[in-house]
Amino acid sequence: MFEYISGTIAAKGDTYAVVDAGGIGYRLTMTANSLIRLKTGEKTRVYTHLYISENIMELYGFASADEREMFRRLIGISGIGPKAAAAILSLYTPQSLAAAIVTEDEKAISKAPGIGKKTAGRIILELKDKLTDSELVPVTAAEQPQSDAASEALEALLSLGYMRSEALTALSGLGEELPTEEMIRQALKKMAR
């Protein structure tokens, strides 16, 4: 119904943004990965998906068309609703999720809130053969920690409940030679600001 909304970001919350377009404020439920890219007061284009069920009519927003496409694929799987799909895409970019699906990494996918090993297996089974070549782009250096200490620090931050995108942002720019504990300490300080 709505392909995208172009306008100014009027407000942001933990799980939503309000886009002012033509004097109308559209409240869009969004993933953490998309929210990080938006700044209040800036003009932007947000790709949308209108989710309608028996009792719910909710507008979801995405910073990229790729993320929206992955969201649509996820909600097309039996037992996965829009909240679960948004939780998965809050932890992973479409490319990193595609990599986890292709490598059949149930453990990684099941890190999303509300996603167990069985559901992760169903996601892999349903989507593995449906991914296109463009979705199978290798995970970028920004999404892949460069040292063992950085990988351990990332896992520690994820286990504390931080979103993958938040943790990666906090760890970026820290010296690769730092011990794991110091990386975690400095990343927590960055996120507390």
Image (tube, helix red, strand yellow):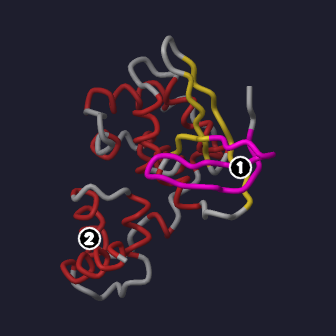
Q: Is residue 59 left or right of residue 84?
A: right
Q: Is residue 123 above or below residue 177?
A: above
| Residue found farthest to the front | 23
Quick one: 29 or 89, which is closer to the camera? Answer: 29
Residue 114 magenta: no
Residue, disc 1: 20
Residue 181 disc label: none
Q: Quadrant of the C terminus?
A: bottom left
Element at label 2: helix
Toward the top, the furthest residue is 54
Left or right side of 127 for 65 = right
Callout in the foreground (1, 2)? 1
In the rendered image, the vertical position of residue 17 relative to residue 156, given as above or below = above
Left/right of residue 157 with respect to residue 6 in the rendered view: left
- Where on the picture, by quarter, is residue 105? top left
Q: Quadrant of the N terminus?
A: top right
Q: Is residue 138 above or below residue 117?
A: below
Q: Position of residue 140 (x, y in %)?
A: 53, 64
Left/right placement of residue 51 relative to residue 4 reads left
Report the residue at 67% width, 44% height from top.
25
The first of marks 1 and 2 along the sequence is 1
Front-lying residue, 187 or 69: 187
Q: Which residues are magenta?
A: 4-26
Q: Alpha-carbon neighbours of circle 1 within 10 Å: few (<14), some, or many (≥20)?
A: many
At mark 1, the secondary structure is strand
Please name the residue shown 41% across and 50% down the image: 91
Q: Please count the marks in the image.
A: 2
Q: CA separation, marks 1 and 2?
A: 38 Å
Residue 153: numbered disc: 2
The amino acid type of the residue labelled 1 equals Asp
Q: Position of residue 173 (x, y in %)?
A: 43, 83
